[in-house]
Amino acid sequence: MAVRSETAYPVGWKNGRVASWLVTVDHKRIGILYIATSILWFVAAGILALLMRSQLATPGETFLTKNSYNEVLTMHGTTMIFLVVVPIVAGFANFLVPLMIGASDMAFPRLNALSYWLYLLGGIVLWLSWFAKGGAAHSGWWSYPTLSENFPWASPGHGQDYWILSLHILTLSSLLGAINFIVTILNMRAPGMTWMRMPLFIWAIVTYAILLLLALPALSAAITLLLLDRTVGTHFFIPSQGGSLVLYQHMFWFFGHPEVYIMVLPVFGMVSEILPVFSRKPIFGYKAVAFSTLAIAFFSMLVWAHHMFTTGLPVGLDSFFMISSMVIAVPTGIKIFNWLATTWRGNLILDTAMLFTLGFIALFTIGGLSGIFLAAFPVDWQLNNSYYIVAHFHYVAFGGIVFGLFGGFYYWWPKMFGRMLDERLGKWNFWLMFVGFNLTFMPQHMLGLLGMARWVYTYHQGGLWEAYNLASSIGSGITALGVAVFVANVWRTNFLRKGVRAGNDPWLADTLEWYTTSPPPPHNFDSVPYVTSARPLRDLRRRLAEQPQ
Amino acid sequence: MRRKLPTLAFAVLVALATAGVAAAGNGGFAPVTPASPNATHIQHAYYLILGFTVAIFILVESLLVIFIVKYRSRGRPRTVEGAQVHGHTRLELIWTVFPVVILAIIAAFVFYELPNIDSAPAAAEPIHITVEGHQYYWQYDYPNGARSIGTLHAPVGAVVDLKVVSPDVIHSWWIPALGGKIQAIPGRTNHTWFQATKAGSYDGQCAQLCGVFHASMLATVQAGSQRQYRHYLATWQDTIGKQIWNGVCATCHGNLGQGGYGPAIANNSLLIQPNALHGIVHNGFTGTQGAMPPVGDTWTKAEFDALAAYVKKNIYKATPAGATSGG
């Protein structure tokens, strides 16, 4: 809201253009801070990816090798997961949860601000570790010991210590945020908004928050033990002195697999919001979509060791984790078919938000299907830690999550800033990213099947290896162009102020955030209508249409 | 015409994919051509899953394209609503149960193939070889005490039981044509096996990030006749010095000791002082230019002697006049 009254901000300096953002406890501003910061890190970690693809474009390159390459791959993964996807979801959730449930703010606004500032601090700690003694961490985002231990031939110096410190700070930030979301959603919903009338995005966020609470402590424990090993001479993960490396793998993946769903469930929620609005239909099977979210979350706690099929676990354990991993495909399939059915007999408005959402369905399906190969553990013995895995999880994390998030940008941008992102640039953004993404990651499936291992900074085979790698590198450049178009679009809309002004409800949407102005005033709503279904705004439009003039 | 478009597009895609497979052997559409029963049976499971997933892929993506083409707004305003369908219990049950059936078939097939993948043929008398992953080379110990570096020698047709270990960090043993991966984990002993079905040289590489030279940690299995195998076991000491230099030292110090990631050592007089060389190779070394791992902590005296003899003869070049020693 551009107009601020003296009573709302009684102290003069707090009204400053910058200061007002520094001291804000408004969930909308905190949400925007989260999203803006995440976008910056998305660009930074994307540049790291381009560096890696440049190195791998042809065999025997010497552009970025050895330790530098390992630092870059570690920072790319860690940044994308902990500084981009998880916080950007927190940003969307911050902005949207109170608006969607008709509340005036989060339950604990100051705690909310603390979450954001901890996130920023954690990110700064991680990125300053480039300058640490011995360089940044270079043992991959899993940081498996003993490679991450403080041995001269493993991870000496302080990069790994800063990595641990950063993750501790980020974990604290996420835990505080999770508690805040749960309390807000449980207690502050608008009158009439029962569980079965909650927007599906809210279902996703409450599930995301619960998963964070359950999964993150395992990570904290694992990296605390690692830190103790590195600094005070314990041997939790030093086998020659009785430690166990398999223990770390279990602890890490007990967190690591739910983490995948922590990242993807909120995006499922966004898709379930955007798709019906642009199909001019209700979601197909609201209950199935809502409950499949819970089912996925439950089973996501039971599949972690499918990341450990090559560890040499007993076949009985491998079998259990194969079956549990296959079980999780069922609720995921339910979602995909329900989304497809949502478009059936609709009036599909193919705006950019919708294109990204449909792109999400197309690409996430591929990521899901390639996962079935990996669940079958003997097949995983072939594919594990090859480039096939890299392709698989990028189809989930980029083709799925990032495309969904871009759909979210285009859909909610007018609500956040009062101006629409440009549709023409939007289409360029989508098609460049769609083509570039597939060109980057589809050939990586083949590379993995040909025998190219992950994490290598070079290879010496020509022929198909070279062709697929070159295609992949060219694709990464096209993807980067797509992202550049997005940045230009944001620049044009927000800074050149050329974006078309949005009214309250430019998309004729279904949920309460579109009931207030764009952007909303600090207190969000003057009044909230009584909620009688999962689509309160459509109900309102119909009531208005029925009223005699 | 408009409705034929998606069908046409998919026909073209399928044709392209098929042509690709035909043109390039498997071209990266399936794991590399198997040369061992376990890899063959993994391949079977792979193809079964590929069949189902390609079918589901075509179903989902073509429905998506068809719906987009058919139900796109075509200029209809946003105010026009689509059919207000809230769900259909029977349909939803179908697409819940159907995947369950498919997954059950896949799981059943995996269990059916598993015995052939997981365990070696029972009748055969296996050769036991220990594979030791090491920063940044693979070392093999044969039943008679012979040893090799980088290249594993095995007779065609024999079942080879591999004991996979590591003294330093986690590595992962992977020769795609001869089966799946297994991690070499410090403090743990893992097992895998292969039975080369025809003679040849099978390449692979370490599949777990193990440090600076993870990319250089290549492995080869050389499957030859029984005679060639026995010949190697009898003569391994003749070549072990060279194998160690090429497979271990040269990774960091260059083929001729000219330097690379590690310092140049060709002129270093340490190379002709066997005791000092033994110390540094056995214990590792932390100096101003970084750390050298204890690459030789599991080598025998015979191997050190062979290495010392090899570097003295082939690598060491006396310091040029006027230069200082100790590179």
Image (tube, grey):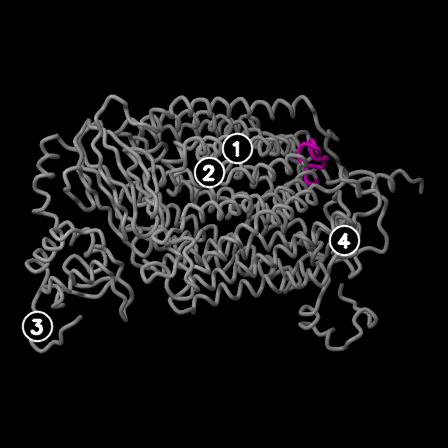
Mark 4: which amino acid? Gly
Chain identifier of the residue bearing label 2 in the image: A
Which residue in the protein does label 3 denote? B320
Judged from the image, the secondary structure of the residue bearing numbered disc 1 is helix
- State if disc 2 and disc 3 touch (CB < 8 Å): no
Instruction: Note whether residue A398 is visible.
Output: no
| Marks 4/2: CA–CA distance | 48 Å
Mark 2: which amino acid? His
Judged from the image, the secondary structure of the residue bearing numbered disc 2 is helix
Q: Position of residue A446 (x, y in %)?
A: 37, 38
Q: Nearer the viewer, residue A272 or B167?
A: B167
Q: Same chain for the residues at labels 3 and 2, yes or no?
A: no
Which residue in the protein does label 1 denote? A324
Judged from the image, the secondary structure of the residue bearing numbered disc 4 is loop
| Marks 3/1: CA–CA distance | 67 Å
* Numbered circle sitting on residue A503: 4
Chain identifier of the residue bearing label 1 in the image: A
Residue bounds of the magenta highlight: A277-289
Mark 1: which amino acid? Ser
Q: Same chain for the residues at labels 4 and 2, yes or no?
A: yes
Q: Is residue A88 a member of the stretch shown in magenta? A: no
- State if disc 2 and disc 4 touch (CB < 8 Å): no
Outermost residue toward the front in this view: A242
Q: Where is residue B124 in the image (x, y as percent from the top left)?
A: 23, 24
**Which of the marked residues, 1 or 4, is nearer the chain's N terminus?**
1
| Marks 4/3: CA–CA distance | 82 Å
- The 10 Å Cα crowd at callout 4, few under 14, some 14 to 19, many 20 or more, is some
Q: Nearer the viewer, residue A309 or A481?
A: A309
Q: Same chain for the residues at labels 1 and 2, yes or no?
A: yes
